[in-house]
Image: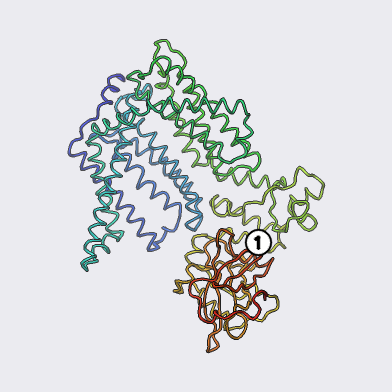
Amino acid sequence: MADTAGAVATEPRAMDRAVQWLIVVIAELAAVLLLVLHEGIDRQWPGFADPGLRMLVYTLAIAPPLMLALAIERAGERFSFIAIGLLAMLLAAVAVHTGSDCPPGSWASRAVSMPYWTSLTIALFVLLPFLQAWRDAGTRLPIGLPYSGLYHHAWDNALALAATVAFVAAAWAVLWLWAALFALVGIPEFRELFAQPRFVYPVTGLITGFGLVMSRAQSGALRAVLRLCLSLARALLPLVMLLALLFLAVVTLKGPDALWQTRRAASLLLWLVLFGVVLANGVYQDGGAEARYPRWLRRFVSAGLLSLPAHAALAIWAICLRVGQYGWTPDRLTALLVAVILALHALLMAWAVLPTRDGRWLARLSTGNPLLAAMVVALLLASQSPLLDFRALTVASQLERLTRGELRLSAATPETCGIDATADTDPAATACRDGNPAARPVERFDLHLFGNQLGVQGRQALERLKRDPRYAGDTRLIAEIDDALRDQYASLEKPRALAADDLRVLPAGTALPASLFESIAADLKPGAPNDAIGSRPDCHPALRICVLMAIDLGGPDGAEWLFVPSGTGFSPPPLVYGKTSDGSWQLMAWVAESYNSVGAFTANALLDQAPTAAASRWWALRVGDKSFPIIDGRPASLDRRPATPSAGP
């Protein structure tokens, strides 16, 4: 029975009209649910601010409907509805767990949600062919599912999704052209309509539904395109295997030490393994035909496939060395997960090239690939659950390193012992004072990792550090933790107003004219229209220094004033303020932040060395041996020579 089902599954089935309309209805209902969620968030309806609810609704509105639209073949079938309904219950639990760890703020929330959506997409794409083949087999337990059925369902789903995405993109391109053309003749209503969420969501759902129907109806034609593309795998696989063998030979002769000098060794090795695994599976396809290789070339390719586990082992070695030095992070945990998955596939390839009783090349892939696919689904879903929570593992790892003295948390100035060991209560300082050179810190505790990438539990760890009595008197550290906890994107959208305490006036003791600060604050006020300034500076008296310096640039009535931002993030260029004829202060010019690749002109640079005014055809500021021209909008008041061209303030 399984063999018959597998044979049937290799040929796409025609959908009746009821199924086609059902797919459109499913897509439209999902779009309406997403519209309700959008409106609830935008209008701040009660409960819609909860990130757990958001993640739950997004997951249930996207994943189960899309899987059902790809899987269903008969309007009356119950298997797909029951199986995907049960799966939706599992996804709901995973979504609530991940959503509850999303902190407020777009940046920190995205750092949690993006790995979730990536893992969920891959896991469900791998899982769906199992459900489809199980339905085709008609057995009570998913045992002995035909490999050809799994193979063809997986590619049919991929091709249908790709064709649907192309159709939706083309349809929206036509709508965009529609709106643009009518706007040319004074009818902007279409542009306004097409930008409304109440139009975008339902229309996109309708287009997606029809795209899925058309792409699934043309699966036979898409398979012909697939066969053409997979034929290229036969040509590329020997080349990739040649690369694998040559690289392994060089590493064997020269040693792996050179690999550890860069941060790209693991990723490049994993790409090599991935190419080899994908191309080999492309050559094997569903196992129905032998690869058209001469015997000698088949043996050469087999040798290359046998080398893939060694490349995967080198990648895992590189990751482990990095973890031993710097501890776990979500990126390193993800890299290790990918490396383990690819290493298992590489081992399967090495096992598949060994001789079999029937003499078929790579025949063991039919048995091993489904087992590895099931393992991949389990690992990916576990990584987004409490069973294998990468963020929790990272928090525990980094806090343990801090406790052992391998990290420096204090904001004190580094001294001979790696930190200010005489005044610091940091565990690293204690170990250093005790004379333990092995405990000397090699890096700073990454506050922004905890504040922006580790979800709620990372932010809770920072809050605990703020309340730790050992750091109660370290005002700079408290300021840095507060800075790490803020939403980085919100600070760009709604920067706080500039305060006089944010500025360091140079030379020290120089009186700051009140009207000057009022003018600067007005120009740098959030939302103030000034194309010359562009973005607003993010000044902080303890963390991001902004300098206001008196300097004679040749304007009337003595010195001008130079405002220099910290240079971190998005900041305006250094600004030149001068006094007008009515006694008020006005923005007159600005300074090139960098010139001829000599480096940035920032506030921190001025703390070590004050600039001098250089008289030339283009007025310039000189810091040491670097010159930064005053450009764009220099007023006539700066045309005369400074009283002392070579002297600083």
- Name the residue tied to disc 1: 478
Q: Nearer the viewer, residue 97 or 490?
A: 490
Identify whether 303 is placed above or below 204.
above
- Horizontally, residue 413 falls left or right of residue 619, namely right
Identify whether 100 is placed above or below 341.
below
Q: Position of residue 447 (x, y in %)?
A: 61, 54
Q: Nearer the viewer, residue 446 or 129?
A: 446
Task: Label 1, secondary structure: give it.
Answer: helix
Q: What residue is rendered at 62% in x and 28% in y?
A: 254
Q: Position of residue 544 (x, y in %)?
A: 61, 65
Please state, as top left, top right, bottom left or bottom right, where the C terminus lies in the image.
bottom right
Instruction: Work out whether residue 134 can be spotted.
Output: no
> Quadrant of the rendered structure where residue 501 is?
bottom right
Q: Nearer the viewer, residue 450 or 335?
A: 335
Q: Position of residue 318 (x, y in %)?
A: 60, 35
Identify whether 469 is placed above or below 639.
above
- Horizontally, residue 71 falls left or right of residue 474, namely left
How many marks can you see? 1
**How was this image coloured?**
rainbow
Q: Please, which residue is most extreme toward the top here?
A: 357
Residue density around tag 1, few if under 14, some if 14–19, many if 20 or more, within 10 Å: many
Identify whether 10 is placed above or below 160.
above
Instruction: Work out whether residue 207 can be spotted.
Output: yes
Q: Amino acid at mark 1?
A: Ile
